[in-house]
Image: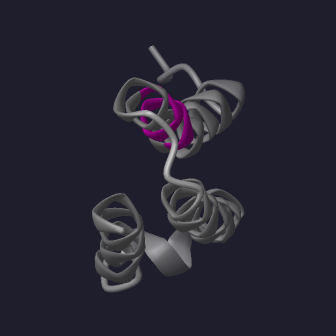
């Protein structure tokens, strides 16, 4: 449950940033991904797996939104003009 709160709080804070409206192509898919991962975090916690399994699942689920953000940022990187 705590991981889901962190994911949702991160996106709630992100909506208050100025770049939210400047780069919707990055932040809106990231917000949807965070909500989906929050639901999966709650669902995996409800299954009550062994602590090691739950920890590994949460690390994986928390890494997916950040991996998406990095991949999106790298794919849209423009080298500065020299």
Where's residue 26, x and y in %?
Answer: 63, 57
Q: Give the range drawn in magenta.
A: 56-61
Where's residue 22, x and y in %?
Answer: 53, 72
User: How many numbered marks, from 0 up?
Assistant: 0
Going by the image, does 75 lie left or right of 18? right
Give the residue drawn at x 61%, y 25%.
74
- Which of the two residues, 23 or 45, is positioned nearer the viewer here? 45
Whether the magenta-drawn stretch holds residue 59 is answered as yes
Q: Which picture quadrant has residue 11?
A: bottom left
In the image, residue 44 above or below residue 22? above
Give the residue drawn at x 53%, y 34%.
57
Quarter the C terminus occupies: top left
Q: Which picture quadrant has residue 7?
A: bottom left
- Which of the two residues, 25 or 77, is positioned nearer the viewer here? 25
Whether the magenta-drawn stretch holds residue 27 is answered as no
Residue at the extreme top: 82
Where's residue 75, x and y in %?
Answer: 71, 27
Quarter the N terminus occupies: bottom left
In the image, residue 51 above or below residue 43? above
Main secondary structure found in the magenta portion: helix
Going by the image, does 63 lie left or right of 10? right
- Which of the two residues, 35 or 13, is positioned nearer the viewer here? 35
In the image, residue 82 above or below residue 18? above
| Scheme of image coloration | one colour
Give the residue drawn at x 61%, y 69%.
39
In the image, residue 4 above or below residue 37? below
Give the residue drawn at x 28%, y 78%.
13
């Amino acid at each position: 449950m705590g991981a889901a709160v962190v994911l949702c709080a991160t996106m709630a804070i992100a909506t208050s940033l100025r770049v939210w409206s400047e780069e919707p192509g990055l932040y809106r898919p990231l917000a949807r991904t965070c909500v989906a991962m929050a639901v999966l975090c709650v669902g995996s916690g409800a299954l009550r797996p062994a602590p090691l399994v739950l920890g590994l699942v949460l690390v994986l689920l928390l890494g997916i939104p950040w991996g998406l953000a990095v991949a999106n940022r790298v794919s849209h990187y423009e080298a500065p003009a020299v």
